[in-house]
Image (cartoon, rainbow, N blue to C red):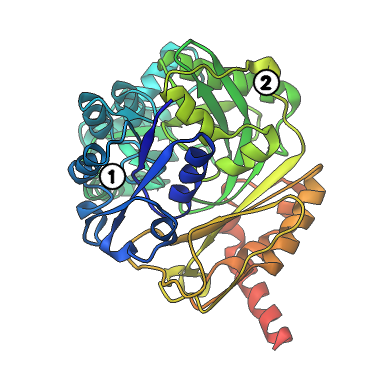
Amino acid sequence: MFKRLLIANRGEIALRVARACRELDIDPVMVYSEADRDALHVQLAAHAYCIGPAPAQQSYLNGDAILTVAKAAGCDAIHPGYGFLSENAAFAQECADEGIAYVGPAAHVIATMGNKAAAREMMKRAGVPVVPGSDGSVANAHEGALVAKEIGYPVLIKAAAGGGGRGMRRVYDPDRFEELFEEARAESRACFNDDEMYLEKLIVNPHHIEFQILADSQGTIVHLGDRDCSIQRRGQKMIEETPSHVLSDELRERMGAAAVAAARAAGYQNAGTVEFVLDHTGEFYFIEMNTRIQVEHPITEMVSDVDLVREQIRVAAGLPLGFTQEDVHIKGHAIECRVNAEDPMCNFAPSPARIDFLHVPGGMGVRVDTGIYQGYTVPAQYDSLIAKLDVWAPTRLEALRRCRRALEELIVEGPATNIDLLHQVMYHPQFIHGTYTTSFMDEHLQEILDWNGEQKKVNA
């Protein structure tokens, strides 16, 4: 097992990894930018090193600075968390070249699965269902338009290196194809320094279902069930739950088997997530594989009793999982709400501000992962996620009621947040019945905002 591990991240995920390290008797080392000097992950660290100014490119994305600290501090492993360098194949290879274990899959696997077009072709060869689309990337808008005409509109233009909804455009009208193709390509170039694009048939109003997998170096690959991530806005997830309310036992088994097959085809080791879309007929299709720990991993931990971060670290150290698929038993139901410092009433504008008052909920089956505290100032330079509220209960209805109660107890004064919006979603009939799709927020956002506004008037 490792002796000292550097956590190349910030906020709640840095704290989450540090806790796993402490329980494995590994000495965690933190890094931080100048903007994060007062951050909780720094304040609670025994070892913390500044790696640069506030902009992520000069700090959390500065692989050279991170490796310099890792070597100077005597670290034998690096955990990238999610975001930043977590799916950067070059950084993973640099770690390997320096003799430092990277807590994640091998660099060549990250590179292959990070290229959505290449990953799609690999899945086709492995017999995993994929959405109809282009054979690999398309060279330009003209070639893309020909493919779009062949597979039929609507289509989805996607960046091969994309993620988080960036570098992606839906096209319903052939006359707008070229314009939207160039928009998506420019966004991909700006966000990922890569302008390789490919096309897929747009599956209208699907469910977004993902499967958590774990794989060790001895060839054992298991999945830990599914998560329904269909409550999202502009490709950004807002609420996740497990298990999905729309999957039958038979469909869940087939999708789980496909997820394991996808991981095996990729030669995957460590934790990863295989993402599918499920259409209204019950057909499912592979869309991508995330080669890192997911933001929403706590709900899988709650229903499986498996510490995913602990298993990540053990696998990276060459240890076996110690359990098989037959040993995995999903119990109860869990829901996660992503709490962001943003103002839904002002088009979700980020709201960096000082936390004047903070109260986090507790009680049976409630977990809050956060890096904020009373008196902390949310920085403007990073993602607006400030907390993850996760609840577990024996049944979905009980979990739903517990989540409502916990959201009512969660108080963050200072920055604007989306807490009220999340609370209102919990009362929407489509969410209660579990019939929502990825179009839910597009169709109901204004209705929910108006409802929330009326409630505030009544309370005033």
Using the rendered image of the protein, determine whether residue 272 is visible from the camera's viewpoint: no
Residue 253, image quadrant: top right
Q: Residue 184 or 163: which is nearer the viewer?
A: 163
- Asked if 167 appears above or below 88 in the picture, the reply is below
Q: Which of the two labelled residues, at mark 1 and mark 2, occupies the earlier sequence position?
A: 1
Residue depicted at x 42% and y 12%: 125
Q: What percent of the width, then of the height, locates residue 210?
A: 56, 34
- The residue identified by callout 1 is 181
Mark 2 closeness class: few <14, some 14–19, many ≥20 residues within 10 Å: few
Image quadrant holding the N terminus, namely top left
Image quadrant holding the C terminus, namely bottom right
Q: Residue 17 or 223: which is nearer the viewer?
A: 17
- The residue identified by callout 2 is 253
Residue depicted at x 41% and y 46%: 164
Residue 87, image quadrant: top left
Is 357 left, or right, of 158 in this rendering? Answer: right
